[in-house]
Amino acid sequence: MKKMAEIKEKILAAVISFGGVWAFPRMLSIEEAWIGYTNSIVSVFLFAFLFWGINGIWKRGFEGKISRWVLPGGFGVLFSACMVFGAQLDGKESISFQDKEMWLGILALSVNFTLLVRFLWDRMWEAGRKNRDKCTTGESSYFKDVHEICSKKMFPGSLLKRAGIIFLCYLPVFWAVYPGFFVYDAQDEYLQVLTRNFSTHHPLVHVLLLGGIVHLFYKLTGSYNIGIACYTLLQMTVMSLIFAWCVEKLKHRGMGKAGRALLTLYFGVCPVLVMFSLCSAKDGLFTGMLLIMVALLQELWKEPDVFWGKRHSVFLLTAASLMMMLLRHNGFYAFLVFGLISIVSLCQFKGGKDGEESLKEEKNKGVGGNISFPVKPVLYFAGVTALYLLVNSFLTGVFHADSSENQEILTVPISQMARVYKDEKDKLPQEERMLVQRYLPEGALLKYMPKVSDGVKIQFNNEAFEENKAGFFKLWVKWGVKHPFTYLNAWFMTSYGFWYPDTVIDVYRGNSVFTFTYGDSSYFGYEVEEPGTRESRIPWLNELYRKMSLEIFQQKIPVVSMLFSPGFLFWVTAFLLGFLCYQGRRRSVMPFLLPALCWLTVILGPTYLVRYVVFLWALLPLLLWEVFKAWK
């Protein structure tokens, strides 16, 4: 009987492995008729590897109930679907939702990835248990160290020294790209200050900060480049301090010297973080504020009562929360949802433990006996939200900023309707064509580009929308019911780069800007918009950043290319957060819910660019350390 069971397991492993081999090409952006893989010995090697792996997983076995498959199964299905969908979008700019073989391929891949994820999470959990048994220090010492760094005993000399090291790492790049990366609407923000003609299209705090500094130093020196350089140096300083503060946090949570040295080096030389630390766009400072928030929210969720007793920590969290929302409009929506979820969750997390012990206690005691109304969290979230609305309204009123634009929040509907119009123009009723043209000129509709909606939404008629909002939404819903797959394809095309790791970011291909025309890559803006000019002091380093930004350069290097991929960083983050959920460590997961909500807002944006999710690179060390604590 035992031998027969082993034979059945091997047969099942062979079937699953063959399914994985057959479906594998669907994860890649290649032609369906291409036989370089199917008629190749490479497929044999892949089958042998999968069979060996799955058979080994089978022998190790799986402990626990059926419910233990829910999270690995969900991850496996979602990852498989995104890989297959992304490959089709990358190659054909649409998904064939009625393709039965595609869904069969997703099913085959889902089984393989579910087994793999469950196996990895179980082994990670097992390793954590063994190392915790050897550990002599308990959770209480960890909490003590966390709170010491928040106290007045923290040594500012260590922080400043580390910030200085990170700043020095930035300096060669600064001289190479002098006066800095003045790009991504930088000219528009500066002109608002110059002409005193403000709008809420860009966050007013950043407009005033960037434009004010550039204009001030231009008045003092007569040089735009000096003004841009001063803003760049200011942002470099702020980002260096924030990153150094983060390293100090992890130092007091138990990170050793080698880990701190590597993390300092990571913050100082990681090209993605360097690009946006030296870039005039608001995304760098937004990332810094989000990093501060997550680091402090980790402490709040570990011991809420202790955290609320630290006034300086509460003040810093409040300031970072306010600035985060003032620097990016979508930050407000993410914070609002996060606040509501946190208040409800903190009712249940009054005291107690996290992870396995928490799950056992809740089963024995029941959650109801532990619930209490979280007064301080309510005051914090409500207070910060009210403060943001007050400051934002004050700035809008004082500077008479135009707030009539609606197209930013309507990006997805606009791109969806434009795709339907372009694909189905001749089939649409005359009255529907006339109605949509009230909001979007036909010239704009016909300029629809699948990967970016800027060319269409920039001509959106806000006056017509204000006069008849109901007509716009009624038509949008009507077309959505008739063309659901077109709507899905339109949305996926502006967002798939955030969740498909193999994407080469080329959304601006063919677009001419001040100093060049985008070609094969739009990874980073790179240039210096007018009135600034590039004055490189280190030409070879300037050329290196130009290649990383505007050419398919790092994408040609296997493995290394993934370190630059927003989609890859997303799945690494999802895998680690999934593992924490799998362990039942809900308090460890909750602080990362905020950046997760920010990510959800950007997939509703006009296109996929690294700038919108650069926080994934900054937050990864905090998440890795949270997972690594299982081995401490």
Image (tube, rainbow, N blue to C red):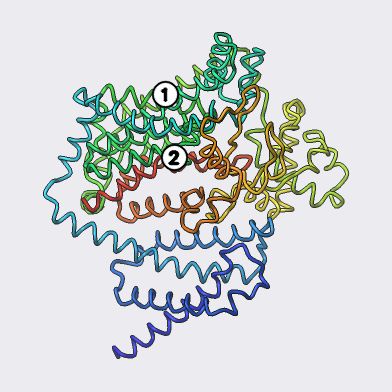
Where disc 2 sits, the SS reads helix
Disc number at residue 384? Answer: 1
Which residue lies most toward the left here? 136
Q: Position of residue 435 (x, y in %)?
A: 82, 37
Where 113 falls versus 193 (above or below)?
below
Classed neighbour count for the residue bearing mark 1: other residues with Cα under 10 Å, few (<14), some (14–19), many (≥20): many
- Check disc 2 and give the amino acid type: Pro
Q: Amino acid at mark 1?
A: Val
Where's residue 222, x and y in %?
59, 11
Pair 1/2: label in front: 2
Residue at image point 34% right, 24% down: 316
The correct choice, above or below, for 174 with respect to 609 in the image is above
- Is any part of residue 438 visible from this angle? yes
* Disc 2: CA contacts within 10 A as few (<14), some (14-19) or many (>=20): many
If the image is split into quadrants, where does the N terminus sit? bottom left
C-alpha span from label 1 to label 2: 17 Å
Residue 477 visible here:
no
- Element marked by disc 1: helix
Viewer-proximal residue among 82 and 387: 82
Query: Residue 36 sits in which quadrant?
Result: bottom right
Quick check: 244 left or right of 532?
Answer: left
Q: Earlier in the sequence, mark 1 or mark 2?
A: 1
Residue bearing the label numbered 2 = 595
In depth, the one of 521 and 540 nearer the eye is 540
Please say if 319 is above or below 516. Answer: above
Task: Pick out the residue farthest to the top.
Answer: 220
Image location (x, y in percent) of residue 426: 87, 51
Q: Quadrant of residue 169?
A: top left
User: Where's residue 278, x and y in %?
Assistant: 49, 31
413 sits left or right of 500 in the view: right
